[in-house]
């Protein structure tokens, strides 16, 4: 679960990491009173979870109240990476002489947490960072003073900046560990003329599987009705931008089906993993949900029956076939009892196949002009 | 850390055997021929599930049966403490079927195993199966697997079944099939699986099923080159068409920027000399031609 910038900064404050003064605003008038409180010039920042906010015009410095009003109006509703901006952070502008990068992140390959830091922070860090990113291993019990000093030395920091860096790093690491983050990132860290540091942005990704130990972050139910329905049934669901809705039992299986759809010249409308134990009612719910997507013109169901009984799946599919079909169902059913499953669907209006490739081709053909 | 599975008929235990999932799969393991000798659920000692005696503690189950391996169906919240209990009781192989385990708990499990000379597979794994020993430590559907010379290692459960089924239908049986798990961090890595496969005479070729997210396949490719891995290797990577920054079902299947893309993995494996299948249905032909 990724936190908004303002949520991440609230955590930073809780752990004593210095951040600029800021106010959250949900509309233009709130933004203007925030500007009154913060003073000018101020920075107005779209609160979105998608990357590329700056390039999309979601961060702007305003110098007058008129400018603030215009920009607040423009940014509220701005679409960044498909996501609509619903809130703004109005923040004091911070002078700085240098921008650094600092993060505590899971290194999947090494199977440990690492602290990462660079003297060249800012928006282009992903391309630049490969050159001068410094690393320090983070033990499970936490980073020691010596570990923090080692990273500061690797960066060539000294004086006040070095001591503030070590303090910021230790606090960020404690935050990462106690709140169970996959990533706690400050980019950029502002280095001011007096050598002091300030966290200008936050990117905090919590470990979803650890949320049971952190009830204060409980996941809000998805706003989108389709995602809400998927969550209710425990489906893994990702909305995509094509017209073939892909449903299957198992994440890897659905993922491979998406690739086959793409290879056949089609475009998937969604990724829907039923999960294990694809019983009849779950299959029905999944197909109804997929059919409900405005963009879906064909439903492709890929079931490999192992522990899942393919006859149960077939019964579920037969049930939905009785509905008025807006979009036709193409099902691949393979595995234990597949002959019986295919027999159940005979004459149901659902096209059934033994291999995924055949089902994919039929579904893609259905939506082709 | 070495790798050894129980021999045919060796006793194994199931932690969390009284749950719906635990009891279902304890039964299926037994019917496959695996010697599920005892179950463990705290507070449920004395019950019998699928003809198997339930104990309150792993210590008691180990004392009664001499088991060295455990399959865990415990809830995510309880996995780390269940693993600690198992290792303290002398369990050397833990197969953690449990999904939704916090990353830091998995990291602690890795350290627990390292410090005690134990091995864990998973979490979020379908487990491991060795048909020649009638050994099924997990939830995979037995009919898809046949004895043979392929070692199959997978990050995905259902794709492991699908690929095994495809191989089996092409008369390419498996010496072992193991799911490393769908999480960002796995207690047993693909690299360890490959090292293990290199030592097994029965293994003639290896099939690796990877997916988007992380860099396990890239690391594996480096390892293949560094160790001059001596057996033919066929790989398949799911998720070529997946969008970025979205969890595609598995917690570990997510692309950030250019990190974790299928292209990167496919290119790395090709450079290392692996044959990369475009679909799972191409795998048997590539395995046959690789021999």
Image (cartoon, coloured by chain):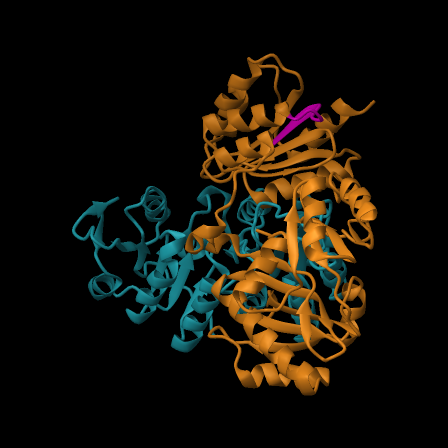
Chain colours: A orange, B cyan
Q: Position of residue B2 (x, y in %)?
A: 47, 73
Q: Is residue A347 magenta?
A: no
One can see residue A47 in this view: no
Residue extending farthest to the front is: A36
Residue extending farthest to the left is: B46
Q: Is residue A300 magenta?
A: yes
Q: Residue at x 57, y 54 (%)?
A: B155
Q: Position of residue A60 (x, y in %)?
A: 80, 53
Lateral position of residue B47 relative to residue A282, left or right: left
- Between residue A135 and residue A110, name the one nearer to us: A135
Q: Position of residue A316 (x, y in %)?
A: 50, 23
Q: Quadrant of residue A81?
A: top right
- Between residue B287 and residue A242, name the one nearer to us: A242
Numbered range of the magenta stretch: A293-301
- Between residue A310 and residue B120, name the one nearer to us: B120
The image quadrant where one finds the C terminus of chain B is bottom right
């Amino acid at each position: 679960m990724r936190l908004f910038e303002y949520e991440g900064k609230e955590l930073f404050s809780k752990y004593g990491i210095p951040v600029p003064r800021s106010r959250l605003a949900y509309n233009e008038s709130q933004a203007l009173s925030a500007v009154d409180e913060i003073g000018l010039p101020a920075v107005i920042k779209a609160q979105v979870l998608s990357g590329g906010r700056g390039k999309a015009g979601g961060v702007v410095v305003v110098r007058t109240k008129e400018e603030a009003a215009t920009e607040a109006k423009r940014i509220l509703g701005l679409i960044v990476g498909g996501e609509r901006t619903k809130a703004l952070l109005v923040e004091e502008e911070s002078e700085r002489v240098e921008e650094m990068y600092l993060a505590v992140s899971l290194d999947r390959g090494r199977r440990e947490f690492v602290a990462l830091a660079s003297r060249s922070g800012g928006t282009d860090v992903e391309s630049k960072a490969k050159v001068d990113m410094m690393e320090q291993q983070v033990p499970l019990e936490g980073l020691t003073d010596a570990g923090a000093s080692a990273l500061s030395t690797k960066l060539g920091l000294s004086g006040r900046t070095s001591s503030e860096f070590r303090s910021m790093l230790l606090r960020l690491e404690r935050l990462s560990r106690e709140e169970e983050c996959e990533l706690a990132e400050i980019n950029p860290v502002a280095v001011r003329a007096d050598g002091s540091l300030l966290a200008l942005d936050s990117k905090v990704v919590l470990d979803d599987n650890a949320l049971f130990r952190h009830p204060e972050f409980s996941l809000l139910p998805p706003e989108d009705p389709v995602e809400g329905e998927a969550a209710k049934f425990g489906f893994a669901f990702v909305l995509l931008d094509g017209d073939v809705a892909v449903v299957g039992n198992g994440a890897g299986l659905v993922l491979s089906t998406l690739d086959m759809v793409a290879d056949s010249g089609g475009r998937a409308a969604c990724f829907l993993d039923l999960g294990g134990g694809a019983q009849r009612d779950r299959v029905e719910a999944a197909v109804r949900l997929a059919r409900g997507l405005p963009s879906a013109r064909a439903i492709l169901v890929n079931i490999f029956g192992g522990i899942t009984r393919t006859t149960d799946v077939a019964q579920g599919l037969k049930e939905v076939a009785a509905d008025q079909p807006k979009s036709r169902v193409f099902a691949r059913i393979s595995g234990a009892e597949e002959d019986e499953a295919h027999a159940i669907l005979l004459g149901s209006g659902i096209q059934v196949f033994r291999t995924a490739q055949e089902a994919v081709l039929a579904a893609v053909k259905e939506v082709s002009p | 850390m070495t790798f050894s599975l129980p021999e045919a008929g060796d006793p194994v235990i199931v932690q969390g055997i009284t749950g719906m999932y635990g009891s279902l799969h304890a039964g299926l393991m037994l019917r496959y021929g695996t010697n599920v000798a005892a179950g463990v659920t705290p507070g449920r000692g004395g019950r019998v599930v699928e003809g198997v005696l339930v104990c309150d503690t792993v210590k008691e189950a180990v004392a009664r049966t001499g088991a060295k391996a455990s399959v865990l169906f415990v809830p995510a919240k309880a996995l780390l403490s269940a693993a600690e209990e198992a290792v303290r009781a002398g369990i050397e192989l833990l197969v953690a079927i449990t999904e939704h385990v916090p990353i830091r708990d998995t990291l602690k499990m890795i350290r627990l195993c390292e410090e005690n000379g134990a091995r864990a597979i998973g979490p979020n794994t379908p487990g491991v199966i060795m048909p020649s020993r009638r050994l099924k430590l997990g939830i995979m559907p037995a009919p898809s697997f046949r004895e043979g010379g392929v070692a199959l290692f997978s990050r995905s459960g259902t794709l492991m079944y699908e690929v095994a089924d495809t191989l089996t239908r092409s008369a390419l049986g498996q010496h072992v099939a193991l799911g490393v798990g769908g999480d960002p961090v796995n207690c047993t890595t693909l690299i360890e699986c490959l090292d293990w496969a290199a030592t097994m005479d029965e293994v003639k070729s290896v099939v690796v099923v990877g997916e988007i997210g992380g860099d396990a396949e890239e690391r594996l490719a480096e390892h293949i080159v560094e160790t001059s891995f001596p057996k033919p290797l066929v790989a398949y990577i799911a998720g070529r068409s997946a969008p970025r920054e979205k969890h595609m079902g598995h917690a570990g299947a997510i692309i950030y920027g250019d990190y974790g893309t299928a292209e990167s993995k496919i290119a790395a494996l090709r450079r290392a000399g692996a044959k990369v299948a475009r679909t799972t249905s191409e795998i048997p032909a590539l395995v046959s031609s690789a021999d």
